[in-house]
Image (spheres, grey):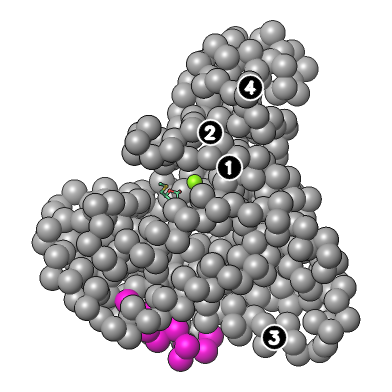
Amino acid sequence: MSRYYTFTAEDAVEYARKYGGVADPQSLVTADEIGDGNLNLVFKIRDTTGKSRVIVKQALPYVRCVGESWPLTLDRARIEAETLIIHGQYCPQHTVKVLHHDAELAVMVQEDLSDHQIWRSELVQGKYFPQAASQLGEYLAQTLFHTSDFYQNAQTKKAEVSRFTNPELCQITEDLFFTDPYVDHERNNFDPVLQPEVDALRADKPLRLAVAALKHRFLSKAEALLHGDIHSGSIFVAEGKLKAIDAEFGYYGPVGFDPGSAIGNLLLNYCGLPGLVGVREAADGREQRLKDVRELWLSFSERFLQLAREKSQDPTLAEPGYADVFLQDVWHDAVGYCGAELIRRTIGLAHVADLDSIKDAAMRADCQRHALSLGKWLILTAPQISDVESFIARIRQFS
Ligand code: SR1
Ligand code: MG
């Protein structure tokens, strides 16, 4: 018999008193359920002064944003906690701290980050965090290098691939990223004014082939323990600080998927800015997003190369020059996954505020068309875009 039950606010307070690691547990008195993601319950636990002290997060046995008609494994809570613990081992400064977790209750207690904000909300308001992109690059380099075959013992790594097999969550990505947007599926969600663009995407044979190759690599390339859902809503920022959260999609997959998803979300903001802050005012924000893209990729790739030079354990992968060759493939994958993120967040099930919160309907549709055409073009031209400078130059030309 499973011990699982769905927490009420009172249960969350009681749990936080036991496992929150606070010196004065009896001072914890209230819980606000603040979950605004697609999947879980999230309780902010406050003390008698109203101060938020810890977070209790519990997985529901179904997809929250859809309801009980879409059951979903509770094992995602274990995967999330164990992924964050490993990522925290290699990059503690940019990974939310797990204080306690219980796989059967599908619950995790994590550090309170009330002095941070969700990066997406800040980007939607036109705010700029100049260090966030390079810190995210650092997080990705540390976590992806140290869980890859460059650093892991080959036998240990195979056991880890098995521990982090995450079939149900991976299937969500496989369907929502790579399948649904290109077929007529009831989960898709878009304004009917976009129907001509959607029809054109679905009829585009070279695009469908390129998306098939991206999905195939997502299905089969067990290169490193990915975060698996590293969009700007899975990232907390504060001045000079950044922390990744929400790793329930963690699994061993292609390294390019994480930086590609992250860059895709920066470009969703780039596409939405004219509708969010005004056409003239968008220019500065757009330059900041392109700067973010450059810094994210450069900090990721430079740190990955440094780690490969200094810490590679596999004698063959340590061959001078091999990490550069590997990263070139990662780059091309990342550009493709970035394009797929732009498309699926515009016409698939799960959207983003960077586009959906644009009030003017005509402007919103224009920004969505931009995201769709940019996404399609990135997927198609990924093999020809050699580096981040030409990527940025092409995005500037593309409107
Ligand atoms: C049904 S889950 C929809 C989306 O939310 C998550 O954050 C992932 O991005 C997933 O694709
Ligand atoms: Mg999430």
Q: Earlier in the sequence, mark 1 or mark 2?
A: 2
Mark 4 beta carbon near ligand 1 (under 8 Å):
no
Judge from the rendering whether residue 96 lies leftward or rightward of residue 36; answer left or right: right
Residue 116 visible from this viewpoint = no
> The disc labelled 1 sits on which kind of residue?
Arg
Q: Residues within 10 Å of mark 4 (few under 14, many from 20)?
A: few
Judge from the rendering whether residue 79 lies leftward or rightward of residue 346; answer left or right: right
Residue 385 lies within the magenta run = yes
Q: Earlier in the sequence, mark 4 or mark 1?
A: 4
Separation (CA) of disc 1 from disc 2: 7 Å
Which residue is labeled 4 in the image? Answer: 1
Are discs 1 and 2 less than 8 Å apart at CB? Answer: yes
Question: For the point 62% across and 24% down, which residue is it?
Answer: 2
Mark 3 beta carbon near ligand 1 (under 8 Å):
no
Q: Residues within 10 Å of mark 3 (few under 14, many from 20)?
A: some
> The disc labelled 2 sits on which kind of residue?
Ala
Question: For the point 75% across and 23% down, which residue is it?
Answer: 21
Judge from the rendering whether residue 368 lies leftward or rightward of residue 111; answer left or right: left
Are discs 4 and 2 less than 8 Å apart at CB? Answer: no
Separation (CA) of disc 4 from disc 2: 18 Å
Which residue is labeled 2 in the image? Answer: 59
Which residue is labeled 1 in the image? Answer: 76
Q: Earlier in the sequence, mark 4 or mark 3?
A: 4
> The disc labelled 4 sits on which kind of residue?
Met
